[in-house]
Image (cartoon, helix red, strand yellow):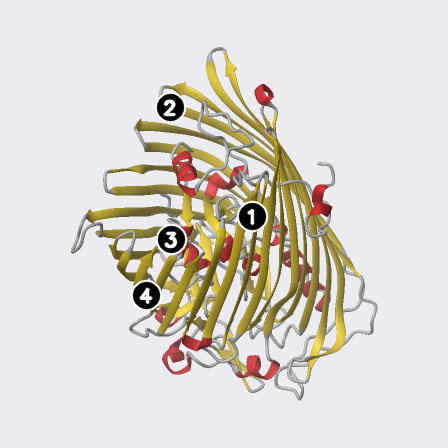
Amino acid sequence: MRTFSPLLAAAFLATAPVLAQTEDSRLEEIVVLGERRTATDVPTAEEMASRFLLRPGAESIVSEEMLREKRVSSLQDVFEFTPGIFTSSRDQGTGGLLSIRGSDIATEGPRNGRGVRGYIDGVPLGRTEAGLTAPLIDLLAASYVEVYRGGSSLRYGALSSGGSINFVSKTGANNPGTSVRLLGGSSDFVQGQVEHGGQHGDVDYYVSVSSQRFDGYRQQSAGDSSRLTSNLGWRVNDDIHTRFYLTVGSTHQETSGAIPLDQIKQLRRTSDELSLRADTDANFDFYVRAANKTQVDLKENGLLELSAFALHTSFDHMPTPFSGIVDNVWREGGLGVRWENSLDVFGTPVETVLGSRYTYTVGDFKRWTWENGGHDRGQLILEEDFTAEILEVYAETAIELAPSVKGFLGFQAVRTTRDIDDQFSGVPVPSVPIFMPGGPQPGSRDGDYSNKVTFEDFVPKVGVNWEWRPDNVVFANVTRAFEAPTGSDVANIVDRNARLPGLLLPDIEAQTATTFEAGFRGGVEGLRYDVTAYHSRIRNEILTRCADEVSAACTETVAFNADRTIHQGVEVGAAWVIAQNVVMPGASLGLDLTGAWQDFYFDGDRRFGDNRLPNVPKVFAITSLRWGGDTGLYVRGVVRYTGNRTTTYDGSGGSAFVVPKVTTLGATVGWRAERMNIYVEGRNLTDKAYAADFSATPTVPSTRVGPRLVPATSPLVRPGDGRAVYAGISLGF
């Protein structure tokens, strides 16, 4: 064993009444001791980065400046230089994996960001019970992004074992004027954005309209998306600020199938025959999100925040022919209240935060067999009503223990439910195997398989921060994390048990973790650094496996709990200005480096022993050598390294079932001027064939050869994009 307001919402585009969003877009956090936050406090990315220095945890800022000079269509584009986040990208950035400290490493198919909670301006993004739903995020409308890894996310919700991400929106106050952004390149990728912001007296506004389309590097990987993102802020008086938000959009994405790893060089631009025949896809045909947050300055009695959001999504999905056509509609809403104050207790400065949040989700889930190449619905085979509730209560206190030393103590209590109400009343439909005419087709089940489960936990945190020299800190903390199963996890267990009489798969339990973390960050002249080490002991980690009880060919999966697992690692980030005034006045030569060593493994598991967990590498790193100034010519070269990754839980299959390490190269050449930027970006310049992501299996899976099942000789993977070149321009007026 290894160790180691009144209803003001009607005034904003006739949205549903929801309570308040202020110009301060941070989440629940303790600010610097001695600085009482007011309703006029609007932190910039730089100010937030400085405040993060005084927090006892792994926290980072991604500024808009880091995103102006490249294609931004995926979470990898945003977070590739963020310590501790492993990302992969494929299908022009619309597919891939985002994992924080091992989150989401074993989720099947299009990933939903399990273990990471998403926020926009401090208010939940929505789809809260399912994780981070990337298609709902307008990456081009973010002013900056806050990243909270591991225990740092505890102040935003007790359900995120990986972390939390907050996308801070542009406003008319911080982004005045009009800007146009155009980008085009390989695989007929085209992206455009027009944004405008302004301020008139006590009211400011921001609107962004964006769209993108592409044919895709592979067969069956074309896609398009359109979004309108807007917000309206009103300074009611010196003590009250409110801001309303509205986002409307749609995304359509074909989904290409996996191919054998041992044939990736020959087949990387193709898709499997079944995906082509059924025209598999994943479409958010329509979504709308409204949010609002109000901040009231109570003077010596502190600061009060009231927030609310509402989300409606319509998801039309054909994941595989084995699953059929999925039509899911979600309606979700939430309310939040938060109070913070600066106190003096027996001469000792104390910062206190108290808050609560309630979220309610209603879903209508239906599924049909498929006809006419996946374009038409056949027989109804599933109909369910789904509800989920989350109630969170949190508190946090920061105390000055000594000069430059601060202690932090906090907790969150959470209770959440998953309720599946089986509404199917049709005649049972038999499934059709793949080797039969018209197959494969999913079938329906007979009987009522409603199910309701409840999960709850108490999540404490304790930490300390020492600023041993100005802007340089050492920190440590111990936190507990809690993550409940998603609605899909619960529903899949019910479905598999229903389809096979006598089968009784165990219910899914919530996973919990205790994490020990320490690190140091800060900087000296010309150098900024961020180093964090962590060790997490996880019980009941939620993973997925082949539902071989239903299909020996691994065409369906089901969630399960591991006994005990360990996630540990070291995260590193650094930015070094090597020299100033290189070649020409004002131009500097710099080096950026981000990477991690991470060791995730089963800890004496009954089935998998101490084997390494799959899907993520032990080592990954990205480095960039950059030259240029604030204006004029600039050049950047990028090297990305991803270590090898295992594909089976039990380590079987030998080297044939290990995805090999890969190094890819990129470069950017551009020209900066006042309110203008022109650039050309190249990715994967050596045209490496590599696996972007894949779905792990418990052991070497079986594959079908006609009606027979034989052991597979290679894992199935989803290739990354080949060599690509993009040209972009942004103009401000």
Q: CA distance from mark 4 to mark 3?
A: 27 Å
Q: Which residue is mark 2?
A: 405
Q: Amino acid at mark 1?
A: Ile
Q: Earlier in the sequence, mark 2 or mark 1?
A: 1
- Say which element carries label 1: strand
Q: Provide residue 63's location: percent of width, then percent of height.
A: 41, 48
Name above or below for residue 124 compared with residue 51.
Answer: below
Q: Earlier in the sequence, mark 1 or mark 3?
A: 3
Q: Provide residue 508's location: percent of width, then percent of height.
A: 62, 53
Outermost residue, bottom side:
437
Q: Which residue is mark 1?
A: 120
Q: Provide residue 719's location: percent of width, then percent of height.
A: 42, 72
Q: Earlier in the sequence, mark 4 or mark 3?
A: 3
Q: Amino acid at mark 2?
A: Val
Tell which tag, 4 or 2, sits nearer the viewer: 2
Q: Amino acid at mark 3?
A: Met
- Say which element carries label 4: loop
Q: Which residue is mark 4?
A: 661
Total numbered labels placed on residues in the image: 4
Q: Is residue 128 visible?
A: yes
- Say which element carries label 3: helix
- Say which element carries label 2: strand
**CA neighbours of label 1 inside 10 A, class few (<14), some (14 to 19), many (20+):** many
Q: Which mark is residue 66?
A: 3
Q: Earlier in the sequence, mark 4 or mark 2?
A: 2
Q: Which mark is residue 258?
A: none
Please tell me which residue lies in front, 231 or 341.
231
